[in-house]
Amino acid sequence: MDFDLFVIGGGSAGVRCARIAAGHGARVGVAEERFWGGTCVNIGCVPKKLLVQAGEYGAWADDAAGFGWTIIKEKHDWPALIAAKDREITRLEGIYRKLLNNAGATIFDARATFIDPHTLDVGGKRVTAEKIVIATGGHPERPPIPGAELGIISDDAFFLKQMPERIIVCGSGYIAVEFAGIFQALGAETHLVYRQPLPLRGFDHDMRESLAEALAAQGVILHPRCPLGKLEAAGEKRILTFGDNEKLSADLVFFATGRKPNTSGLGLDKAGVAVNASGAVVVSSKRQTSQPHIFAIGDVTDHINLTPVATAEGHALADTLFGGNPREVSLRNVPSAVFSTPPISTVGLTEEEASAMGPVDVYVTKFTPMRHNLSGRNRKTTMKLIVDQATQKVVGAHMLGEDAPEIIQGIAIAVVMGATKQDFDRTIGIHPTAAEEFVTLRTRTRVAGVAKAAE
Ligand code: NDP
């Protein structure tokens, strides 16, 4: 065999797995056909957060007046932002490549496809490997409506030549609400068209409600309960038909309607690797596919599609296969953030999930952050704890508000450790912060899930 391990895909999962396996002394090859670092570094988390930050600078310039500053804000220079973002992403992509080189992995800037269970075609070259890891990620999916090809997807949004005057963002998942906030903050008239009554299906109801209020307060025009109809072109403009035959014209229509695993054309059938109905590679908790020497990690398995989960899986797999340290990644209490404006962050169960299991004490607080009493900005913070009544363990913590992801990361450690409400209560707050609310929530807002307990 040419390699002990061959990794297909140089994104978050693949790079970590290849790097750690090579560090354990394995002979590792890794192929990437597009860009090192994958979606997260190039057309996902990292550039997205830079765009969110660009929007926040604009808001701070407005808010500064309340603190005595006179700031004259000119129109935002989108091409300058994209050029700065591109420079940073090029730098990061170089770092990813260097990390692999330094670890001793053999890099292939090429597409890899299976010829048989141990043989790959890597850019026209036959390569054999003892073990193979599929880490090919996913891609944005347009909705099945007429004219969908006339809209853009998140891959395109990072390279727009100019800021649209009016944009319609379709969907209300992570990507839709993040980009709605970005475009609105950078000066576009932004419409969010989605089929649910509230955005972010699956998130805690209070957070969803607070997010709808926050989006509206930011100026995003919301169109809830609106299924998509069709998209048409009228010269350079796009006309979207949605809801009850409503029509809206815009410079751009952006579909943020979900992602699909990258499995087509990989030759998985030749390798005997099974996929499910949505095209995701089927894996065990050990990330083993239907072919025992082939593994799959990250978004291609479509379970929790988050970079830190992908890197954790890549690391654990490399330790298991080559480091003499077999282990699995727990997918319980995975914290996450939606970089809406302001962001949402969460760890553990929603009230709906927790109360379906038994009675829970629910603590909710909603307030205007100190800064905005002076800035005058209409922006609220919502914080919420869900406590299992029987054990008093905090089973869910949720926040919408500035710095929510920074705050919840610390709270997540407590939740993962099984902290109780009393542990939160005996922790001294840091004053004056929003975060201190998590340790000063004294008055229970309500009890939920009692019906379950009575059964
Ligand atoms: P999501 O699965 O989060 O959301 C998809 C959205 O599209 C939903 O609102 C869904 O509506 C809607 N939708 C799907 N099909 C249609 C349709 N045919 N017509 C109308 N609406 C439709 O996908 P995203 O693309 O936003 O993100 C993909 C994943 O990437 C996320 O789930 C997350 O795991 C990851 N991600 C994480 C980020 C982070 O950590 N900050 C940032 C970006 C992505 P409905 O709810 O009705 O089904």
Image (spheres, grey):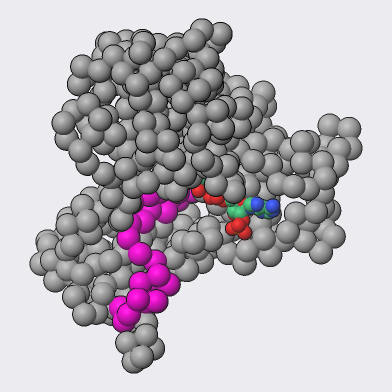
Please determine whether, in this image, residue 185 is positioned above or below residue 426: above
Quarter of the image containing the C terminus?
bottom left
Q: Residue at x 28, y 45 (%)?
A: 329
Find residue 7 and report its image quarter: top left
Range shown magenta: 335-360
Q: Residue at x 29, y 34 (%)?
A: 317
Question: Can I make out residue 102 in this image?
Answer: yes
Q: Residue at x 63, y 63 (%)?
A: 196
- Front residue (pair 52, 152): 152
Does 300 sit left or right of 98 as displayed? right
Please determine whether, in this image, residue 190 is positioned above or below residue 380: above
User: Residue 129: where, in percent of width, then height?
Assistant: 38, 18
Question: Can I make out residue 14 in this image?
Answer: no
Q: Residue at x 26, y 64 (%)?
A: 437
User: Residue 194: where, in percent of width, then height?
Assistant: 66, 57
Question: Does the magenta run of residues contain 272?
Answer: no
Question: Does the magenta run of residues contain 339?
Answer: yes
